[in-house]
Amino acid sequence: MSSPANANARLEDRAFARYPSLVGRTVLITGGATGIGASFVEHFAAQGARVAFFDIDVTEGEALADELGDSQHKPLFLPCDLTDIDALRKAIADVKAALGPIQVLVNNAANDRRHTIGEVTPESFDAGIAVNLRHQFFAAQAVAEDMKAANAGSIINLGSISWMLKNGGYPVYVMSKSAVQGLTRGLARDLGPFNIRVNTLAPGWVMTAKQRRLWLDDAGRRSIKEGQCIDAELLPADLARMALFLAADDSRMITAQDIIVDGGWA
């Protein structure tokens, strides 16, 4: 039997889907400088989309934009603190001015900082909601009029399987991520008459550099092996390829859904 490492290595040899409907489409990705978000930026740019992305990490954001400079449309990086809603609105207006009406929104930004129940204060609670949930609503609000005018659009809200697994150790994060699914369904109902689709993309334990550095240990590897049905590492690209499908016209009748990409864990 082949090892998970060999299975992941073979991904580089595969030919994955191309989506003609994404060519030239303006796509906004929040939290796009590193991790899963960076993979979203890379994959949408490779499809020929006009990609803009926000992040507070200026160094990594600029480096990624430069790295992808030979794409059909070089991604536009704008530094932005998404917990500052006025700054978020201005940055979205700047994207529209530079690239045209936004047709795809990927609400990716989040912070899964570990914390205990006892250490949560009203201030840290509000901060957790702001970084993991609140900006998703206001970003959707800001792009909705463009999508209504086009009578089309796709909003992809990043959730998590953490609350489905009853994970402990970060209660405000888990609560925020469970609320994303309620946000998705409410938006899908209100925006559906305008052919705007809204879905939740819920990752499992994705092996980003941050996860490997901070939390992946032997116990974690055992949990993955026991929990997932597919014995292979879940990679950022696995999420990005699903996001491409949800953004493309191929998924035109899929909305208000929770799309789980986790190797069969939840």
Image (cartoon, rainbow, N blue to C red):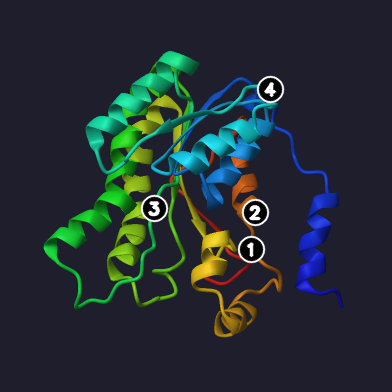
Question: Residue type at mark 3?
Answer: Ala
Q: Which SS class for mark 3?
A: loop
What residue would you read off at disc 4?
A: 72
Instruction: Give the mark nearer the N terminus: 1 vs 3.
Output: 3
Q: Which SS class for mark 1?
A: loop
Q: Do the residues bearing badges 2 and 1 touch, measured as CB atoms within 8 Å?
A: yes
* Residue 46, percent from left and from top: 69, 33
Q: Residue at x 45, y 28 (%)?
A: 195
Instruction: Give the mark nearer the N terminus: 4 vs 1.
Output: 4
Q: Quadrant of residue 49?
A: top right
Spatial CA span between label 4 and label 3:
28 Å
* Residue 60, percent from left and from top: 51, 43
From the viewer's side, name the closer residue of 152 and 99: 99
Q: Residue at x 57, y 72 (%)?
A: 265
Say if 45 sits above or below 228 in the image. Answer: above
Q: Which SS class for mark 4?
A: loop
What residue would you read off at disc 1?
A: 234
Question: Residue type at mark 4?
Answer: Gln
What residue would you read off at disc 2?
A: 238
